[in-house]
Amino acid sequence: MNLIFSLRPSLLLICLLFLLESCTIQDHLQPAANPYENCLLSEVRDVEIHKILPNEDIKIGDNYFDFGHSKVIDIVEIDGSQYALSSSGEDFYGYKYDLQNRLIEQTHSNQFVRGKEMYTYEYTPGKLKIKFVHEGWPSETREFTHTLNEYGFISNKDVIYNSEGYIIKDNYGFKNTISDGNTVKSESGSSISTAEFDLTKLNIPNPTPFNGKADRNLITKTTSVYGYSIPNSIGEYIYKFDNEGKVTRRIRKIYNQDNTHINIREYKYDCQ
């Protein structure tokens, strides 16, 4: 297991978290052998969780709290409290690749939303065509064609990459500081977020490299100062690994002076 922190109150917060979720800080430690070699990310699931009350007797294998539609698959302890994890999830993301390991299909579904979203990707020299389809209600289909730069990243006049392919200015106006292949600082106006990383652990494979490089290592902590009337926040991350060292579960805890939010995410891979 390993530890990490994140942030999020308001749209500004969400933007910062999105940026930092691939970041890190630490000394010059180097990861061991790459556990993701010949592996691609295939599934991501945000797990539904239930905080177990003192008078509740809940065991692994019991019906979850959704009228028997799913089971309790695990029980974890976070800050002295126990949480039951459901076999179903709130959000599900699926990824498929071509023979060159390029993303060709991405799906997203949410148990509270009708239908699912599907993105398909078609590659031609210097171009990336993306088709978006929302199935169910309301149905929607859109297509976009992006120009790719010499590094294979989507060209955007508002996005600036450094020489290694990391985003140092995004289309929301955030300026990023990169160290050891990780975004250790992100700032815009009075909002500043810093991130710490475990330099001995490589990050989860990035399924969308055309959006720029993701952080090299696993993020462990974020500290965010927003200014104005938005409370500052701290995030921490805890990881579960398989026998090869791949992340199979990430627990993210975000807290500020008003509340604490916990998200548990699970990962699956296709390995050759």
Image (spheres, rainbow, N blue to C red):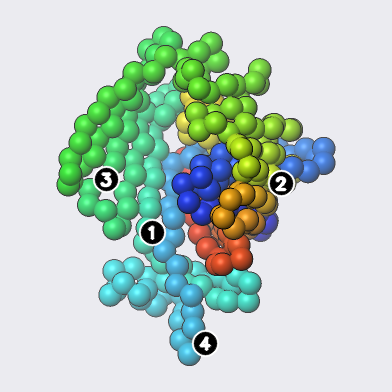
| Image disc number at residue 227 | none
Label 2 Cα crowd, 10 Å radius (few <14 / some 14-19 / many 20+) = many
Camera-nearest label, 2 or 4:
2
Callout 1, which amino acid?
Gly
State the image coordinates of residue 142 (x, y, percent, origin top left): 25, 28
Camera-nearest label, 4 or 1:
4
Which mark is first along the chain, 2 or 1? Answer: 1
Which mark is first along the chain, 1 or 3? Answer: 1
Residue placed furthest toward the front: 228
Callout 2, which amino acid?
Glu
Choose top left, top right, bottom left or bottom right for residue 98: top left
Foreground of the two, 192 or 56: 192
Give the residue displayed 71% in from the left and 46% down from the top.
196
Callout 3, which amino acid?
Lys
Q: Which residue is mark 4?
A: 54
Q: Which residue is mark 3?
A: 116
State the image coordinates of residue 126 (x, y, percent, origin top left): 43, 10
Check contact, mark 4 vs mark 1: CB within 8 A.
no
Which mark is first along the chain, 1 or 4? Answer: 4
Q: Specify the quadrant that holds the N terminus.
A: bottom right
C-alpha gap between disc 2 and disc 4: 35 Å
Q: Secondary structure at mark 4?
A: loop
Foreground of the two, 265 or 31: 265
